[in-house]
Image (cartoon, rainbow, N blue to C red):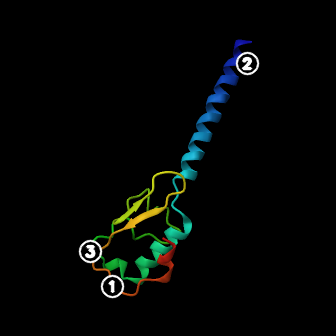
């Protein structure tokens, strides 16, 4: 009987760990439209030539996340689906036309 209970307890703990891990993955993501807008801004304003581009250089299929990976100049909310709260890129050699997609922020 104790072997069955031990196995059930282990399964309960394993289930809780898996669910906790999945919850972290779901809540960690930045809003998709906002992430896309930031990547478009980078491309449209010569991001490769910015003075500080820490975190920004990934492609659209990159695993880099603007809120979780500390993209320079981006500050986000800290709960649920992350939302960009501020974008500060002054004195960063940003040149070009601001894309309309930035309106999603």
Q: CA distance from mark 1 to mark 3?
A: 11 Å
1 vs 3, front mark: 1
Tag 1 near tag 2, CB within 8 Å: no
3 vs 2, front mark: 3
Element type where label 2 sits in the image: helix
Question: Against 82, is 22 above or below?
Answer: above
- Specify which label sits upstream in the sequence, 3 or 2: 2
**Is residue 85 rendered to the left or right of residue 15?**
left
Residue identifier under label 2: 4
Element type where label 1 sits in the image: loop
Residue identifier under label 1: 95
Crowding at dot 2, Cα within 10 Å, few <14 / some 14-19 / many 20+, comes out as few
Q: What residue is drawn where x is 70% and y is 12%?
A: 2
- Specify which label sits upstream in the sequence, 1 or 2: 2
- The residue sitting at the bottom extreme is 97
Picture coordinates of residue 22 (x, y %)?
60, 46
Residue identifier under label 3: 51
Picture coordinates of residue 103 (x, y %)?
49, 77
Picture coordinates of residue 75 (x, y %)?
38, 61
């Amino acid at each position: 009987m104790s072997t069955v209970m031990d196995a059930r307890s282990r399964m309960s703990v394993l289930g809780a760990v898996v669910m906790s891990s999945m919850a972290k993955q779901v809540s960690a993501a930045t809003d998709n439209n906002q992430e896309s807008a930031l990547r478009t801004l980078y491309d449209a304003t010569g991001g490769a030539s910015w003075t500080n581009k820490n975190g920004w250089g990934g492609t659209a299929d990159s695993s880099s996340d603007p809120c979780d990976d500390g993209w320079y100049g981006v500050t986000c909310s800290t709960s649920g689906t992350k939302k960009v709260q501020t974008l500060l890129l002054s004195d960063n050699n940003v040149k070009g036309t601001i894309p309309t997609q930035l309106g999603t922020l």
